[in-house]
Amino acid sequence: MSKNAGRLFRFSSIVLCFGLHTSAGLADVRLPAIFSDHMVLQQGTKIAVWGWASPGEKVAVSLGKAAARSEADESGRWKVELPPQKPGRGFDLEVRGDNSIRLRDVLVGEVWLCSGQSNMEFPLQRTTSGAQDVAAANHPEIRLFLVPKNSVLHPAEDVQAKWEVCTPESAAGFSAVGYYFGLELHKRLKVPVGMIGTSWGGTNVEEWTSPEFLANEADFAPIHERWEKSGEDNKRLFREPLQHEIWLDDVRLLPRAEKDPERLVDDFEDGDLINRLGGRWICGQSSSEVVDTQGEARRALKVTGRLKPGDFPHVQVEWAPDEGTADLRAYKALSFKVRGRGFLKFHSLQPTITDFDHYVDPPFAVTDEWRTVTVDLTNLKQAGWGVQLPLTSEALTGAQFEFVSGVTPMVRPPSGLFNGMIAPMVPYSLRGFAWYQGEGNAGRSYQYRKLLPALIRSWRSAWDSEDLAFLVVQLPNYRPRRAEPSESGWAELREAQLLTARRVPHVGLAVTIDQGQAEDVHPRNKTEVGRRLALQAFSIVYGLPGVASGPIFKSWKRDGPAIRVRFESTGGGLVVKDGEPLRGFAIAGEDRKFVWAEARVEGDEVVVSSAKVAAPVAVRYGWADNPEAKLYNREGLPTSPFRTDEWPGQTIGSK
Ligand SMILES: [Ca+2]
Ligand SMILES: [Ca+2]
């Protein structure tokens, strides 16, 4: 009863009908969260509606004049399909069993699910034009459904979320790529648009794939082995949250020179969350209070929270008021007293680091006894996954203590995100999927050639529809530009995405090789990414006119000392952005040693040659982490990086 009631009371418009059936409350007819006020239902296809009721309870569902009936099965589940609807607004969706539910302000239009890792999760408010775009995000006919992070071992039936009308408040934290993509759809198709955002930074594709599509494939066996060998402490994280409690006191900066005084950051005796440097103590996903304690500490900061994978509970101290920076060059260490239980990880917050790859210390255990911990500020290391940037001791914003599990490395279960963040929306009727992921798999790019198609099959199978469009954002340029042609896991990942788009039906590729930032794995211009996804949708899904893609490699042939490369999707013709010369092509002979080539456009072909390679056998274009890639079509869309050879690259043995 209480479980059901908790779910029910999230919906403002639920009408409970207590009548003759006094037992109605025991198993009221109810709906998963994806059915809520302000929802968008997919036009032009049967609309699945499902939920729970008492076993055998008769359920009637209606939307305007459309209606369908069903009966809950022995486990209390029911499902109906409403006939296809035209786009429209102002509907109520009514579900009647022994009780009734009425969802209001329901629209019919286009529904897309947007998923991936951090670049899909990246919120609108943090983009290049985020401030003004958030302010302008009043779109009554766009609706957003943001799925909370959840990695679990078995398919979840529901999520805690609801459909929101697109406003500055609801759009600010929503996927920027999803928002811009949806806005383009809405502007051109002129129908209501519903966007389901379900993303999680740093995750791998196999986490999003259902178990049956990861089975029976030898190349995926190491994925299962990593999980199986990960140990009981690791596996427990995906079953139950960890509880944390830490007490902090006597936080001090220790000077480099012995003659200099140490600096008290806070002893909490003043009872507030302002520290002695004028900055604040800030908690995230945890709660903090200054409490009285026995003994010497007198007052201390107590922080409590719970941790499950995907959470980021932390407490942080600012070195200066109002998020300003402080010069800590005179200090060698931070010391503090700490007791409680859990593990903490120290992060030094530095404004020049925008990709969260901060200078950190290894996690340390906190126990019931007070002890003094000293963090050597001069010997912190960057976490190592981002772009390396120098420590700026002269300008630091603060320090962060993150609650962590103490399990390193944490291994997340294959299919965990499918279970927690996809399965609860199956089989909500929708048009397709937009997918921006691959950074996490770029060390295993060859394997991604199989993993990405497996994901696509998995989702289409879950929805029982081979027609569902699948749009892929190809990874952008990233990391420092190399002077010479080089191997690159990112180039191989982009190749896996390109091959998937070519081989799997109804898959679109949004090339973004010109949209990245060398120093940041999270490029901030998401507007163009969303627009290019929409171009793919207009072409592949909606059959609208227009050039959707930049040039795509088609074929090559030897022509004396040169290689002629032919392209398709050349639109109004091949062009070199910013004028000649055309850089980014490399060429090699049988020795497989690539050198930069001269390249020129001839019609739909590019002629590639080098005086250093008399007998060329292979051409690569844009083949690097961060290539110079200036070949476009006249519509301003860039050429996907590619190569003509199939020589083993960096990642061929990595699984
Ligand atoms: Ca204080
Ligand atoms: Ca104290």
Image: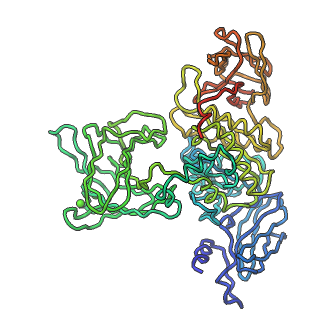
Provide residue 521's location: percent of width, then percent of height.
54, 38
The residue at 84%/70% (across/down) is: 65
Q: Quadrant of residue 130?
A: top right
Q: Quadrant of residue 12?
A: bottom right
Indicate the quadrant containing the C terminus: top left, top right, bottom left or bottom right: top right
Provide residue 18's location: percent of width, then percent of height.
68, 87
From this viewpoint, is residue 276 visible?
A: no
The residue at 68%/33% (across/down) is: 495
Which residue lies most toward the left here?
259
For the rendered model, the colour scheme is rainbow
Image height of 158 relative to 333, above or below = below
Image height of 193 relative to 81, above or below = above
From this viewpoint, is residue 151 visible?
A: yes
The residue at 44%/39% (across/down) is: 353
* Number of callouts: 0
Q: Quadrant of residue 10?
A: bottom right
Horizontal side, residue 61 vs residue 39: left or right: right
The residue at 20%/45% (across/down) is: 262
Q: Nearer the viewer, residue 568 or 264?
A: 568
Provide residue 270's location: percent of width, then percent of height.
25, 61
Provide residue 487's location: percent of width, then percent of height.
59, 27
Image height of 206 relative to 60, above or below = above
Q: Nearer the viewer, residue 467 or 550?
A: 467
Q: Quadrant of ligand 1?
A: bottom left
Indicate the quadrant containing the N terminus: top left, top right, bottom left or bottom right: bottom right
